[in-house]
Amino acid sequence: MSRTVYVNGSYLPEEEATVSVFDRGFLMADGVYEVTTVIDGKLIDFDGHFTRLQRSLTELDITNPMDRDAWLEVHRQLVAQNGLDQGMIYLQVTRGAPGDRDFIFPDPETTAPTVVLFTQSNPALVDSPKAKKGIKVIAIEDIRWGRRDIKTVQLLYPSMGKMMAIKAGCDDAWMVQDGAVTEGTSNNAYIIKDGRIITRALSNDILHGITRAAVLRFAREAQMQVEERNFTLEEAKAADEAFVTSASTFVMPVVEIDGATLGAGVPGPLALRLREIYIEESRKAAL
């Protein structure tokens, strides 16, 4: 049975969904995206993702094609029509398809944004086998453009980074700039030392993670110490624990960084506790 997807106002079987060859998302990576988690058929942190979507679109001067309630209705329809219990909803908004290729932005009065949404089922999202054993990461140079705070569809280098990690027998890569870790290929990065959670402060250098914001809030509410500052790769290798956060992994423990084993080489107690808290609190607030 095929999925039902959403394309420019219509709900369609995935095999019938099409986008123009002149779409600027395809030709120029001129678009943004969001991924919202679904647990128990409900949306996690929807409003955070909507707010960040609005910010990303504004930064690129793309008109938001729908208001908050319309976006919410599309998400809920896709959950219902696909019977989604655990997984994600991916949305992408591009500057549209002006009918030809040009570096100049098309007139928004005559070229509407392209809107695509689809579901991805993941029955093991909450009870993740990887979370029980932890992941291994390698370090790579961060050579992305300078506006990483905008959630654009420019994902080639992060994809290459994941492939570098797989070729090295690991799960993911952490990117490093001027000696300091910025973030993972599709997640925010953290280390834990002497009970302190350390992660890079918000700036244009990293994505302003929705899961990041929730996890740090829960950590502070649980009286955990949080430091938002740069940390070096060497600091990371000497950490007691480490983890990453994202909408698709929640809190994922890291047990090895660039060949250096952290602690006993198994997920640490603080990372595991944060994962439990995040899932528990997110379920309570789900829409």
Image: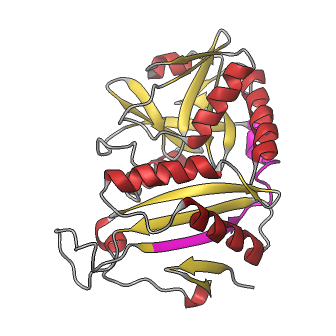
Q: Is 127 in the magenta?
A: yes
Q: Is residue 151 visible?
A: no
Q: Position of residue 247 (x, y in %)?
A: 63, 48
Q: Which of these two is toward me, 11 or 239? A: 11
| In this rendering, position of residue 209 left or right of residue 23 | right
Q: Position of residue 25 (x, y in %)?
A: 36, 69
Q: Is 172 in the magenta?
A: no
Question: In the image, what residue occupies the spot 55% across and 43% down?
Answer: 172
Residue lying farthest to the top in this orientation = 194
Q: Which of these two is toward me, 36 or 135? A: 36
Question: In the image, what residue occupies the spot 38% across and 32% down?
Answer: 203
| Residue 206 versus residue 265 in the image, above or below | below
Question: In the image, what residue occupies the spot 51% across and 36% down?
Answer: 138
Question: In the image, what residue occupies the spot 28% across and 67% down?
Answer: 28
**Within the image, what quadrant is residue 176 found in?**
top left
Q: Position of residue 159 (x, y in %)?
A: 46, 55
Q: Which residues are magenta?
A: 115-133
